[in-house]
Image: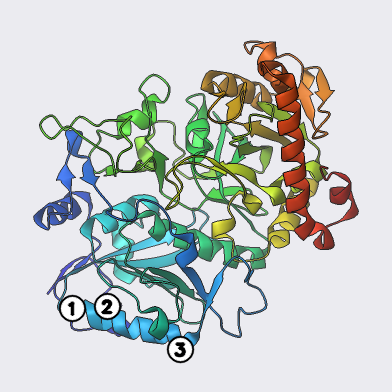
Amino acid sequence: MTFGRVNPQFRLEDQGIEGLGNVYYNLMEPALIAEALKRDEGTLGKGGAFLVSTGTFTGRSPKDKHIVKTDSVADNIWWENNAAMSPEGFDALYADMVAHMKGRDYFVQDLVGGADPTHAIDVRVISELAWHNLFIRHMLRRPDREDLDAFTADWTIINCPSFKADPKKHDCRSETVITMNFDRKMILIANTEYAGENKKSVFTLLNYLLPEKGIMPMHCSANHAVGNPVDTAVFFGLSGTGKTTLSADPGRILIGDDEHGWSDRGTFNFEGGCYAKTISLSREAEPEIYDTTTKFGTVIENMVFDPETFELDFEDDSLTANMRCAYPLEYISNASKSALGGHPKNIIMLTCDAFGVLPPIARLTPAQAMYHFLSGFTAKVAGTERGVTEPQPTFSTCFGAPFMPRRPEAYGNLLKGKIAKHGATCWLVNTGWTGGAYGQGQRMPIKATRTLLTAALDGSLAEAEFRKDPNFGFDVPVSVQGVPELLLDPRRTWDDKAAYDAQAEKLVQMFADNFEQYVPFIDDDVKAAAIG
Protein backbone atom coordinates (compact mmCIF):
# COMPACT_ATOMS: atom_id res chain seq x y z
CA MET A 1 0.00 0.00 0.00
CA THR A 2 1.14 3.52 -0.73
CA PHE A 3 0.12 6.66 1.16
CA GLY A 4 0.82 10.34 0.66
CA ARG A 5 1.70 12.53 -2.28
CA VAL A 6 4.15 11.47 -4.96
CA ASN A 7 4.85 11.76 -8.66
CA PRO A 8 2.95 8.73 -10.06
CA GLN A 9 5.80 8.23 -12.54
CA PHE A 10 8.45 8.22 -9.81
CA ARG A 11 7.45 5.75 -7.12
CA LEU A 12 9.94 3.35 -5.52
CA GLU A 13 8.84 0.65 -7.97
CA ASP A 14 9.96 2.92 -10.80
CA GLN A 15 13.40 2.92 -9.18
CA GLY A 16 13.48 -0.86 -9.02
CA ILE A 17 12.69 -1.06 -5.30
CA GLU A 18 9.77 -3.47 -5.01
CA GLY A 19 8.05 -5.80 -2.58
CA LEU A 20 7.97 -3.41 0.38
CA GLY A 21 5.23 -3.16 2.99
CA ASN A 22 3.48 0.19 3.30
CA VAL A 23 5.26 3.13 1.69
CA TYR A 24 4.51 6.59 3.03
CA TYR A 25 5.40 9.40 0.60
CA ASN A 26 6.06 12.95 1.71
CA LEU A 27 4.05 12.84 4.92
CA MET A 28 3.96 16.13 6.77
CA GLU A 29 5.01 16.63 10.37
CA PRO A 30 1.83 15.58 12.23
CA ALA A 31 1.48 12.37 10.22
CA LEU A 32 5.17 11.49 10.63
CA ILE A 33 4.98 11.99 14.39
CA ALA A 34 1.82 9.85 14.54
CA GLU A 35 3.57 7.05 12.64
CA ALA A 36 6.71 7.35 14.78
CA LEU A 37 4.65 7.12 17.98
CA LYS A 38 2.69 4.14 16.60
CA ARG A 39 6.04 2.38 16.05
CA ASP A 40 7.36 3.33 19.49
CA GLU A 41 10.30 5.21 17.95
CA GLY A 42 10.24 7.94 20.60
CA THR A 43 8.17 10.04 22.97
CA LEU A 44 5.95 13.07 22.44
CA GLY A 45 7.46 15.87 24.50
CA LYS A 46 6.34 19.32 25.64
CA GLY A 47 4.82 21.44 22.90
CA GLY A 48 4.80 18.47 20.54
CA ALA A 49 8.57 18.04 20.28
CA PHE A 50 9.63 14.48 19.47
CA LEU A 51 12.13 12.92 21.90
CA VAL A 52 14.38 10.14 20.61
CA SER A 53 17.41 8.13 21.59
CA THR A 54 19.75 6.97 18.83
CA GLY A 55 21.15 4.01 20.78
CA THR A 56 24.79 2.98 20.26
CA PHE A 57 25.58 5.76 17.79
CA THR A 58 25.19 9.23 19.27
CA GLY A 59 27.55 10.93 16.83
CA ARG A 60 29.00 10.61 13.36
CA SER A 61 31.01 7.56 12.41
CA PRO A 62 33.60 9.12 10.05
CA LYS A 63 35.73 5.98 9.73
CA ASP A 64 32.75 4.14 8.25
CA LYS A 65 32.24 6.62 5.41
CA HIS A 66 33.14 5.36 1.93
CA ILE A 67 33.16 6.60 -1.64
CA VAL A 68 32.85 4.10 -4.45
CA LYS A 69 36.02 4.16 -6.54
CA THR A 70 34.85 4.45 -10.13
CA ASP A 71 36.75 5.83 -13.11
CA SER A 72 34.65 9.02 -13.14
CA VAL A 73 35.82 10.14 -9.68
CA ALA A 74 39.03 8.19 -8.98
CA ASP A 75 41.36 11.09 -9.86
CA ASN A 76 39.37 13.76 -7.99
CA ILE A 77 38.80 12.21 -4.56
CA TRP A 78 41.04 12.85 -1.56
CA TRP A 79 41.54 9.17 -0.84
CA GLU A 80 43.70 9.76 2.25
CA ASN A 81 40.55 11.18 3.85
CA ASN A 82 37.86 9.07 2.18
CA ALA A 83 37.83 5.28 2.34
CA ALA A 84 37.35 3.58 -1.03
CA MET A 85 34.69 0.96 -1.76
CA SER A 86 34.70 -1.19 -4.88
CA PRO A 87 31.74 -0.96 -7.30
CA GLU A 88 31.22 -4.69 -6.71
CA GLY A 89 31.05 -4.15 -2.94
CA PHE A 90 28.49 -1.38 -3.41
CA ASP A 91 26.36 -3.43 -5.81
CA ALA A 92 26.30 -6.31 -3.32
CA LEU A 93 25.43 -3.92 -0.46
CA TYR A 94 22.60 -2.36 -2.47
CA ALA A 95 21.18 -5.77 -3.46
CA ASP A 96 21.31 -7.03 0.13
CA MET A 97 19.76 -3.85 1.55
CA VAL A 98 16.89 -3.92 -0.95
CA ALA A 99 16.29 -7.60 -0.13
CA HIS A 100 16.30 -6.67 3.58
CA MET A 101 13.70 -3.97 2.91
CA LYS A 102 11.12 -6.36 1.41
CA GLY A 103 7.91 -6.59 3.43
CA ARG A 104 8.90 -3.67 5.68
CA ASP A 105 7.32 -0.22 5.86
CA TYR A 106 9.33 2.75 4.60
CA PHE A 107 9.02 6.51 4.60
CA VAL A 108 10.01 8.68 1.64
CA GLN A 109 10.72 12.41 1.48
CA ASP A 110 11.37 14.23 -1.78
CA LEU A 111 13.50 17.24 -0.91
CA VAL A 112 15.97 19.81 -2.23
CA GLY A 113 19.58 20.48 -1.26
CA GLY A 114 20.49 24.14 -1.87
CA ALA A 115 18.49 27.40 -1.66
CA ASP A 116 19.81 28.71 -5.00
CA PRO A 117 17.65 26.93 -7.61
CA THR A 118 20.43 27.27 -10.20
CA HIS A 119 22.70 24.98 -8.18
CA ALA A 120 20.20 22.90 -6.17
CA ILE A 121 19.92 19.11 -6.33
CA ASP A 122 16.73 17.10 -5.88
CA VAL A 123 17.14 14.32 -3.33
CA ARG A 124 14.88 11.39 -2.40
CA VAL A 125 15.41 10.08 1.15
CA ILE A 126 14.07 6.59 1.93
CA SER A 127 13.95 5.96 5.69
CA GLU A 128 13.21 2.90 7.75
CA LEU A 129 12.40 5.15 10.73
CA ALA A 130 9.55 7.64 10.58
CA TRP A 131 11.45 10.08 12.79
CA HIS A 132 14.45 10.03 10.41
CA ASN A 133 12.02 11.18 7.72
CA LEU A 134 10.83 13.96 10.04
CA PHE A 135 14.45 14.94 10.74
CA ILE A 136 15.50 15.16 7.10
CA ARG A 137 12.28 17.02 6.26
CA HIS A 138 13.48 19.70 8.69
CA MET A 139 17.06 19.62 7.47
CA LEU A 140 16.68 19.85 3.69
CA ARG A 141 14.49 22.25 1.77
CA ARG A 142 10.87 21.31 1.19
CA PRO A 143 9.33 21.76 -2.29
CA ASP A 144 5.87 23.26 -2.56
CA ARG A 145 3.27 20.48 -2.22
CA GLU A 146 2.08 20.86 -5.81
CA ASP A 147 5.67 20.48 -7.09
CA LEU A 148 5.79 16.96 -5.63
CA ASP A 149 3.47 15.77 -8.40
CA ALA A 150 6.28 16.13 -10.94
CA PHE A 151 9.29 15.59 -8.65
CA THR A 152 12.11 13.30 -9.81
CA ALA A 153 15.27 12.90 -7.79
CA ASP A 154 18.82 13.50 -8.97
CA TRP A 155 20.08 11.41 -6.04
CA THR A 156 18.60 8.78 -3.72
CA ILE A 157 19.51 8.04 -0.10
CA ILE A 158 18.49 4.75 1.53
CA ASN A 159 18.83 4.54 5.30
CA CYS A 160 18.31 1.17 7.04
CA PRO A 161 19.47 1.21 10.68
CA SER A 162 18.36 -2.42 11.12
CA PHE A 163 20.68 -3.66 8.34
CA LYS A 164 24.19 -4.75 9.25
CA ALA A 165 26.81 -4.69 6.53
CA ASP A 166 29.24 -7.56 5.95
CA PRO A 167 32.74 -6.03 5.66
CA LYS A 168 34.08 -8.88 3.50
CA LYS A 169 31.13 -9.06 1.16
CA HIS A 170 30.48 -5.32 0.96
CA ASP A 171 34.07 -4.07 0.98
CA CYS A 172 33.63 -1.83 4.02
CA ARG A 173 35.21 -1.44 7.47
CA SER A 174 32.47 -2.65 9.80
CA GLU A 175 28.78 -3.50 10.07
CA THR A 176 28.09 0.25 9.94
CA VAL A 177 28.41 1.92 6.57
CA ILE A 178 27.76 5.27 4.88
CA THR A 179 28.71 5.05 1.22
CA MET A 180 28.30 7.21 -1.86
CA ASN A 181 28.27 6.11 -5.49
CA PHE A 182 28.61 8.97 -7.99
CA ASP A 183 27.93 6.78 -10.99
CA ARG A 184 24.70 5.36 -9.56
CA LYS A 185 23.80 8.66 -7.80
CA MET A 186 23.01 6.84 -4.64
CA ILE A 187 23.94 6.97 -0.94
CA LEU A 188 23.46 3.96 1.35
CA ILE A 189 23.44 4.21 5.17
CA ALA A 190 23.20 1.15 7.42
CA ASN A 191 23.45 0.16 11.09
CA THR A 192 23.33 3.62 12.65
CA GLU A 193 20.34 5.53 14.03
CA TYR A 194 22.30 8.78 14.32
CA ALA A 195 20.22 11.10 12.14
CA GLY A 196 23.09 13.48 11.38
CA GLU A 197 24.47 10.98 8.83
CA ASN A 198 21.49 11.80 6.59
CA LYS A 199 22.26 15.48 6.23
CA LYS A 200 26.06 15.15 6.31
CA SER A 201 25.94 12.79 3.34
CA VAL A 202 24.13 15.49 1.33
CA PHE A 203 26.83 17.97 2.36
CA THR A 204 29.55 15.61 1.19
CA LEU A 205 27.75 15.22 -2.13
CA LEU A 206 27.43 18.98 -2.71
CA ASN A 207 31.01 19.52 -1.53
CA TYR A 208 32.09 17.34 -4.45
CA LEU A 209 29.74 18.65 -7.12
CA LEU A 210 29.84 22.42 -6.60
CA PRO A 211 33.59 23.13 -7.10
CA GLU A 212 33.18 21.90 -10.69
CA LYS A 213 30.90 24.95 -11.17
CA GLY A 214 33.37 27.33 -9.51
CA ILE A 215 31.25 27.40 -6.34
CA MET A 216 32.92 27.32 -2.94
CA PRO A 217 31.12 24.88 -0.58
CA MET A 218 31.59 25.95 3.03
CA HIS A 219 31.07 24.11 6.33
CA CYS A 220 29.84 27.30 7.94
CA SER A 221 26.87 29.20 9.30
CA ALA A 222 25.90 32.55 7.78
CA ASN A 223 23.88 35.67 8.54
CA HIS A 224 23.38 39.15 7.12
CA ALA A 225 22.52 42.62 8.41
CA VAL A 226 18.83 43.48 8.83
CA GLY A 227 17.54 44.92 5.56
CA ASN A 228 20.93 44.49 3.88
CA PRO A 229 21.69 41.01 2.49
CA VAL A 230 24.87 42.41 0.92
CA ASP A 231 26.37 42.67 4.44
CA THR A 232 26.84 38.91 4.84
CA ALA A 233 29.08 37.12 7.33
CA VAL A 234 30.07 33.45 7.28
CA PHE A 235 31.26 31.45 10.27
CA PHE A 236 33.52 28.45 9.61
CA GLY A 237 33.88 25.89 12.35
CA LEU A 238 33.42 22.28 13.39
CA SER A 239 30.60 21.09 15.64
CA GLY A 240 30.83 22.61 19.08
CA THR A 241 32.77 25.74 18.09
CA GLY A 242 29.70 28.01 18.12
CA LYS A 243 28.55 28.11 14.47
CA THR A 244 24.87 27.76 15.32
CA THR A 245 24.99 29.86 18.49
CA LEU A 246 26.93 32.81 17.11
CA SER A 247 25.13 33.06 13.78
CA ALA A 248 21.71 33.09 15.51
CA ASP A 249 22.28 36.72 16.50
CA PRO A 250 18.96 38.49 17.16
CA GLY A 251 20.43 41.65 15.62
CA ARG A 252 21.05 39.96 12.25
CA ILE A 253 19.15 37.74 9.80
CA LEU A 254 20.06 34.03 9.91
CA ILE A 255 20.77 32.51 6.47
CA GLY A 256 21.65 29.08 7.84
CA ASP A 257 23.62 27.28 10.54
CA ASP A 258 25.78 24.58 8.96
CA GLU A 259 26.62 24.49 5.26
CA HIS A 260 26.58 27.08 2.46
CA GLY A 261 27.75 27.71 -1.07
CA TRP A 262 29.52 30.84 -2.35
CA SER A 263 28.70 31.35 -6.02
CA ASP A 264 29.23 34.27 -8.40
CA ARG A 265 25.82 35.53 -7.20
CA GLY A 266 26.60 35.33 -3.46
CA THR A 267 25.93 33.04 -0.50
CA PHE A 268 23.22 30.37 -0.30
CA ASN A 269 22.21 27.88 2.38
CA PHE A 270 22.17 24.17 1.57
CA GLU A 271 19.50 23.45 4.18
CA GLY A 272 15.99 24.24 5.34
CA GLY A 273 16.63 23.79 9.05
CA CYS A 274 19.07 23.81 11.95
CA TYR A 275 20.71 21.08 14.02
CA ALA A 276 21.79 22.70 17.28
CA LYS A 277 23.74 21.25 20.20
CA THR A 278 21.66 21.53 23.37
CA ILE A 279 24.14 20.73 26.14
CA SER A 280 23.99 23.59 28.68
CA LEU A 281 21.55 25.45 26.41
CA SER A 282 19.88 28.27 28.35
CA ARG A 283 16.97 30.60 27.73
CA GLU A 284 19.10 33.54 28.86
CA ALA A 285 22.06 32.98 26.48
CA GLU A 286 20.23 31.52 23.46
CA PRO A 287 16.49 32.24 23.78
CA GLU A 288 15.51 31.46 20.19
CA ILE A 289 17.22 28.06 20.05
CA TYR A 290 15.99 27.24 23.57
CA ASP A 291 12.40 27.95 22.57
CA THR A 292 12.58 25.49 19.66
CA THR A 293 12.93 22.63 22.16
CA THR A 294 9.23 22.90 23.01
CA LYS A 295 7.89 23.58 19.51
CA PHE A 296 5.82 21.11 17.52
CA GLY A 297 7.86 18.65 15.50
CA THR A 298 11.31 19.66 16.76
CA VAL A 299 13.38 16.47 17.01
CA ILE A 300 15.13 16.23 20.38
CA GLU A 301 18.01 13.79 20.11
CA ASN A 302 19.60 11.96 23.04
CA MET A 303 18.43 14.25 25.84
CA VAL A 304 17.52 13.03 29.32
CA PHE A 305 14.03 14.12 30.40
CA ASP A 306 11.74 13.78 33.42
CA PRO A 307 9.40 10.82 32.75
CA GLU A 308 6.46 12.58 34.45
CA THR A 309 6.81 16.22 33.42
CA PHE A 310 8.84 15.70 30.22
CA GLU A 311 11.09 18.56 31.29
CA LEU A 312 14.39 18.35 29.42
CA ASP A 313 17.65 18.20 31.36
CA PHE A 314 20.14 20.39 29.51
CA GLU A 315 23.03 19.46 31.80
CA ASP A 316 22.72 15.66 31.95
CA ASP A 317 25.11 14.27 29.34
CA SER A 318 24.83 10.64 30.47
CA LEU A 319 23.53 9.62 27.02
CA THR A 320 26.02 11.85 25.14
CA ALA A 321 27.46 15.34 25.22
CA ASN A 322 26.34 15.53 21.58
CA MET A 323 22.66 16.03 22.48
CA ARG A 324 20.86 18.01 19.77
CA CYS A 325 17.63 19.49 18.51
CA ALA A 326 16.60 19.63 14.85
CA TYR A 327 14.03 22.18 13.71
CA PRO A 328 12.94 24.02 10.56
CA LEU A 329 14.61 27.35 9.84
CA GLU A 330 11.33 29.25 10.23
CA TYR A 331 11.33 28.43 13.98
CA ILE A 332 13.98 31.14 14.31
CA SER A 333 12.13 34.46 14.14
CA ASN A 334 14.91 36.31 12.33
CA ALA A 335 15.64 33.59 9.77
CA SER A 336 15.85 34.50 6.10
CA LYS A 337 12.95 33.19 4.03
CA SER A 338 15.08 32.97 0.89
CA ALA A 339 18.22 31.61 2.67
CA LEU A 340 20.27 33.76 0.27
CA GLY A 341 22.88 36.41 1.06
CA GLY A 342 25.48 38.53 -0.69
CA HIS A 343 29.20 37.91 -1.06
CA PRO A 344 30.68 37.57 2.45
CA LYS A 345 31.88 40.89 3.80
CA ASN A 346 33.36 39.19 6.88
CA ILE A 347 34.73 35.66 7.15
CA ILE A 348 35.00 34.31 10.68
CA MET A 349 36.97 31.16 11.38
CA LEU A 350 35.88 29.66 14.69
CA THR A 351 38.27 27.54 16.67
CA CYS A 352 37.82 25.88 20.03
CA ASP A 353 41.37 26.06 21.40
CA ALA A 354 41.68 23.49 24.18
CA PHE A 355 45.26 24.71 24.83
CA GLY A 356 44.08 28.13 26.04
CA VAL A 357 46.69 29.88 23.88
CA LEU A 358 44.81 31.75 21.12
CA PRO A 359 43.27 35.20 21.66
CA PRO A 360 39.47 35.63 21.55
CA ILE A 361 39.75 37.37 18.14
CA ALA A 362 42.51 38.09 15.61
CA ARG A 363 42.49 39.77 12.18
CA LEU A 364 43.95 37.73 9.31
CA THR A 365 45.49 38.75 6.00
CA PRO A 366 44.12 36.81 2.95
CA ALA A 367 47.25 34.59 3.01
CA GLN A 368 46.85 33.96 6.76
CA ALA A 369 43.17 33.18 6.15
CA MET A 370 44.05 30.47 3.65
CA TYR A 371 46.69 29.13 6.05
CA HIS A 372 44.19 28.84 8.89
CA PHE A 373 41.50 27.50 6.56
CA LEU A 374 43.81 24.70 5.40
CA SER A 375 44.97 24.07 8.98
CA GLY A 376 41.45 24.01 10.46
CA PHE A 377 42.72 23.96 14.03
CA THR A 378 40.11 23.25 16.70
CA ALA A 379 39.29 20.68 19.35
CA LYS A 380 36.97 17.77 18.84
CA VAL A 381 34.36 18.47 21.44
CA ALA A 382 33.01 15.67 23.62
CA GLY A 383 30.35 13.52 21.97
CA THR A 384 30.57 14.78 18.40
CA GLU A 385 32.27 11.57 17.33
CA ARG A 386 32.22 8.12 18.89
CA GLY A 387 34.82 7.69 21.60
CA VAL A 388 35.54 11.40 22.13
CA THR A 389 34.76 12.07 25.79
CA GLU A 390 36.73 15.30 26.34
CA PRO A 391 38.07 18.00 24.02
CA GLN A 392 40.95 16.80 21.87
CA PRO A 393 43.13 19.24 19.90
CA THR A 394 42.89 18.44 16.22
CA PHE A 395 43.48 19.84 12.75
CA SER A 396 40.46 19.38 10.48
CA THR A 397 41.28 20.99 7.16
CA CYS A 398 38.75 23.46 5.73
CA PHE A 399 37.04 23.27 9.15
CA GLY A 400 35.20 20.22 7.91
CA ALA A 401 37.56 17.44 6.75
CA PRO A 402 35.01 14.63 7.35
CA PHE A 403 32.76 16.14 4.65
CA MET A 404 35.45 17.04 2.10
CA PRO A 405 35.70 14.54 -0.76
CA ARG A 406 38.25 16.60 -2.74
CA ARG A 407 41.76 17.56 -1.71
CA PRO A 408 41.94 20.56 0.67
CA GLU A 409 43.80 22.77 -1.79
CA ALA A 410 40.83 22.60 -4.17
CA TYR A 411 38.70 24.34 -1.53
CA GLY A 412 41.53 26.56 -0.28
CA ASN A 413 42.24 27.93 -3.76
CA LEU A 414 38.54 28.52 -4.38
CA LEU A 415 38.28 30.47 -1.12
CA LYS A 416 41.42 32.47 -1.89
CA GLY A 417 40.06 33.35 -5.34
CA LYS A 418 36.68 34.41 -3.94
CA ILE A 419 38.32 36.64 -1.30
CA ALA A 420 40.58 38.20 -3.93
CA LYS A 421 37.67 38.86 -6.30
CA HIS A 422 35.05 40.12 -3.86
CA GLY A 423 37.08 41.30 -0.87
CA ALA A 424 36.39 40.16 2.67
CA THR A 425 37.85 40.84 6.08
CA CYS A 426 38.92 37.62 7.76
CA TRP A 427 38.92 36.93 11.51
CA LEU A 428 40.04 34.03 13.69
CA VAL A 429 37.81 33.68 16.78
CA ASN A 430 38.65 31.39 19.70
CA THR A 431 35.58 30.07 21.54
CA GLY A 432 37.69 27.60 23.53
CA TRP A 433 39.69 28.15 26.70
CA THR A 434 41.41 31.09 28.37
CA GLY A 435 43.44 31.43 31.56
CA GLY A 436 44.79 27.91 31.11
CA ALA A 437 44.28 24.79 29.08
CA TYR A 438 41.19 22.53 29.24
CA GLY A 439 40.82 21.28 32.81
CA GLN A 440 42.54 24.34 34.32
CA GLY A 441 41.30 27.45 32.50
CA GLN A 442 37.77 28.62 31.77
CA ARG A 443 35.68 28.57 28.62
CA MET A 444 35.78 31.88 26.76
CA PRO A 445 32.79 33.98 27.97
CA ILE A 446 30.12 33.97 25.26
CA LYS A 447 29.25 37.58 26.10
CA ALA A 448 32.82 38.68 25.22
CA THR A 449 32.75 36.66 21.97
CA ARG A 450 29.44 38.25 20.95
CA THR A 451 30.74 41.76 21.74
CA LEU A 452 33.88 41.21 19.66
CA LEU A 453 31.91 39.76 16.76
CA THR A 454 29.45 42.65 16.81
CA ALA A 455 32.38 45.09 16.62
CA ALA A 456 33.93 43.09 13.76
CA LEU A 457 30.70 42.96 11.77
CA ASP A 458 29.68 46.60 12.24
CA GLY A 459 33.16 47.76 11.19
CA SER A 460 34.13 49.44 14.46
CA LEU A 461 36.77 46.81 15.32
CA ALA A 462 38.75 47.73 12.21
CA GLU A 463 39.34 51.16 13.80
CA ALA A 464 40.88 49.65 16.98
CA GLU A 465 44.58 49.60 17.81
CA PHE A 466 46.14 46.22 17.01
CA ARG A 467 49.28 44.42 18.15
CA LYS A 468 51.11 41.65 16.28
CA ASP A 469 50.96 38.34 18.13
CA PRO A 470 54.55 37.15 18.72
CA ASN A 471 53.69 33.46 18.25
CA PHE A 472 51.22 33.46 15.36
CA GLY A 473 51.90 36.71 13.50
CA PHE A 474 48.26 37.86 13.21
CA ASP A 475 46.86 41.17 14.47
CA VAL A 476 45.09 41.22 17.84
CA PRO A 477 43.08 44.22 19.13
CA VAL A 478 44.60 45.89 22.18
CA SER A 479 41.30 47.14 23.61
CA VAL A 480 37.63 46.82 22.70
CA GLN A 481 34.80 48.52 24.55
CA GLY A 482 32.87 46.05 26.70
CA VAL A 483 35.64 43.41 26.76
CA PRO A 484 38.22 43.17 29.58
CA GLU A 485 41.65 44.08 28.17
CA LEU A 486 43.14 41.16 30.07
CA LEU A 487 41.06 38.75 27.95
CA LEU A 488 42.52 40.10 24.70
CA ASP A 489 46.04 39.06 25.71
CA PRO A 490 45.88 35.31 26.54
CA ARG A 491 49.28 35.28 28.20
CA ARG A 492 48.07 37.76 30.81
CA THR A 493 45.13 35.48 31.71
CA TRP A 494 47.51 32.71 32.86
CA ASP A 495 48.85 32.77 36.42
CA ASP A 496 51.94 30.85 35.26
CA LYS A 497 53.41 32.83 32.33
CA ALA A 498 56.17 30.26 31.70
CA ALA A 499 53.50 27.56 31.38
CA TYR A 500 51.69 29.72 28.79
CA ASP A 501 54.92 30.17 26.81
CA ALA A 502 55.56 26.42 26.84
CA GLN A 503 51.97 25.73 25.74
CA ALA A 504 52.20 28.34 22.96
CA GLU A 505 55.46 26.87 21.71
CA LYS A 506 53.88 23.42 21.69
CA LEU A 507 50.90 24.65 19.67
CA VAL A 508 53.09 26.55 17.18
CA GLN A 509 55.03 23.34 16.56
CA MET A 510 51.78 21.42 16.07
CA PHE A 511 50.70 23.97 13.44
CA ALA A 512 54.07 23.70 11.68
CA ASP A 513 54.10 19.89 11.68
CA ASN A 514 50.54 19.69 10.40
CA PHE A 515 51.08 22.20 7.59
CA GLU A 516 54.00 20.31 6.05
CA GLN A 517 51.50 18.23 4.03
CA TYR A 518 50.19 21.31 2.16
CA VAL A 519 53.50 23.03 1.36
CA PRO A 520 53.97 21.35 -2.08
CA PHE A 521 50.50 22.52 -3.17
CA ILE A 522 50.36 26.18 -2.12
CA ASP A 523 51.55 29.58 -3.33
CA ASP A 524 54.47 31.50 -1.89
CA ASP A 525 52.32 34.10 -0.09
CA VAL A 526 50.63 31.36 1.94
CA LYS A 527 54.01 29.72 2.65
CA ALA A 528 55.21 33.11 3.96
CA ALA A 529 52.21 33.24 6.33
CA ALA A 530 53.01 29.82 7.78
CA ILE A 531 53.52 29.56 11.54
CA GLY A 532 56.65 28.11 13.09
- Give, as a three-letter code, the residue at label 1: Leu
Q: What residue lies at 83% left-to-right and 63% top-to-bottom? A: 520
Residue 424 visible in rendering: no
Question: Residue 12, which numbered label?
Answer: 2
Dot 3: what SS?
A: helix
- Give, as a three-letter code, the residue at label 2: Leu
Q: What residue lies at 33% left-to-right and 37% top-to-bottom? A: 317
Q: CA distance from mark 3 to mark 1?
A: 24 Å
Q: Is tag 1's residue or tag 2's residue first in the polypeptide sequence?
A: 2
Residue 497 visible in rendering: yes
The answer to which quarter of the image holds residue 360 is: top right
Dot 2: what SS?
A: helix
Cβ–Cβ under 8 Å for marks 1 and 2: yes
Question: Residue 88, which numbered label?
Answer: 3
Residue under pointer 1 = 20
Question: Which of the pair 423/54 is nearer the observer?
Answer: 54
Q: What residue lies at 51% left-to-right and 24% top-to-bottom? A: 251
Few, some or many residues within 10 Å of mark 2 (<14, 14–19, 20+): some
